[in-house]
Amino acid sequence: MAQRNVLQYIILGLLDQRPLTGYELTKAFDSDIGEFWSAQHSQIYPQLRKLEEAALIKHEDEISGEKLTRKRYDVMPAGQVMLNDWLASDATEAAPGKDEFPLKLYFIRTAQDRRLGPMLGTQQRLHEQKLIHLRHQMATKFPEGVGKSDFGHYLVLDYAVRRETAYCAWLTDAIARVEA
Amino acid sequence: MAQRNVLQYIILGLLDQRPLTGYELTKAFDSDIGEFWSAQHSQIYPQLRKLEEAALIKHEDEISGEKLTRKRYDVMPAGQVMLNDWLASDATEAAPGKDEFPLKLYFIRTAQDRRLGPMLGTQQRLHEQKLIHLRHQMATKFPEGVGKSDFGHYLVLDYAVRRETAYCAWLTDAIARVEA
DNA sequence: ACGATCATGTAAGATGTTACATGATTAT
DNA sequence: ATAATCATGTAACATCTTACATGATCGT
């Protein structure tokens, strides 16, 4: 997964929607995008510099108050080409995607292991909270179903809800199995 | 996710089941474990050296044929303690888990975009193949349901099947939406 | 004999996280 | 005033991938 520099494409994609600052890009990884990718500002600012050096994006300085300047970045034509190339490139495999919890479970041999209850319980709480949050997002962002200009966003939220629903159902069944 | 050195715990967990060589450990990431974590031999051999330096594992030389020696690693008591600490440590958040495909979708605005059909179709083929493979694994590894000593393995395979099932269902519905 | 697989390692470079560092603006 | 948030950057370090490198064994 690494080595393909997915981050640069995400940045191009977000900037293609509307011009954003590094700070705003960073925040994007805490909400929608955060379900599928993460990145810190320490990774984003250097990447913005590289993209600008490659003339894929440009920035304009904005001033708020007395002297605070922020850089608002925008995609250049070459950047749009690169973004579209990425979108058109097709995947060759269903990505593995790392998840630490199933791994732990893999090393627990018997249903009688005392650690199973707490482990599964904690995960259940975490994922049910996440599911509630996602359903809430769905309800607030798409109260009347999917519109004309947000199709991808809708599909992706739908995916996240389904993924967490399946995760929770699995945990519930696993807990039932342990108790039986 | 990084910085916690999950790889070392996976190695300890695998070696705790039975002694393995670096080569065998590497292969483990192509089958069961591969659904949740990946690692190349270039990462595994150095990690084995570090674990041995820390006296968490040890190895014995095995000879096959004339002169080919392989190192078969085994967990030491200190390694078992560390493995158990990891298993007992509880997660503080539901991990994000990176997945490139939903991300691409996020940047597609309308259901009329010509790229949607091929993109979703490719993913559907990949994930349905994966699901078939996982179901086959389930049928061969647990033909009579879960046994006494493989509970974790069963749970984890069950999870993988459910995850792919949900993924496929989502793709099918998404494709139906695009065609409508 | 030859190709597939077994077997182990290193090197270079990309990606990602945590911590360090600084300062401005806004709301209370 | 002061705390929260806005805003941008760098440094050190850990993780991960790709490629380089070598040689043995097994099946046909």
Image: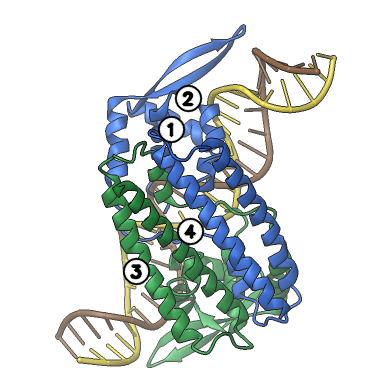
Chain colours: A green, B blue, C yellow, D brown
Q: Secondary structure at mark 4?
A: loop
Could you tell me the amino acid type at mark 3?
A: Gln
Tell me which label, 2 or 4, sits earlier in the chain.
Answer: 2
- Using residue B76 as the reference point, say whether residue B167 is left or right of it: right
- The quadrant of the rendering that contains the N terminus of chain B is bottom left
- Callout 3: chain: A
Same chain for mark 3 and mark 1? The answer is no
Nearest the eye: B53 or A147: A147
Q: Are marks 3 and 4 on the same chain?
A: no
- Classify residue C22 by image quadrant: bottom left
Q: CA distance from mark 2 to mark 3?
A: 39 Å
**Circle 3: element type:** helix
Q: Position of residue B25 (x, y in %)?
A: 51, 31
Residue A52 in sight: no
State the mark number for residue A129: 3
**Residue A28 visible in this rendered orientation of the protein:** yes
The residue beneath circle 1 is B14
Q: Give the x, y percent position of residue B95.
A: 41, 59
Residue type, numbered disc 1: Leu
Reading the image, the residue beneath label 2 is B20
Marked residue chain, label 4: B
Q: What whole-number distance in Å separates the C-alpha atoms at marks 3 and 1?
A: 32 Å
Q: Are marks 1 and 2 in contact (CB under 8 Å)?
A: yes
Rendered position, B36 above or below A43: above
Please rate how many residues cluster around mark 1, counting C-alpha atoms within 10 Å: few if below 14, some from 14 to 19, many from 20. Answer: many
What element does badge 2 sit on?
strand
What is the C-alpha distance between the residues marked 1 and 2?
A: 8 Å
Q: Amino acid at mark 2?
A: Leu
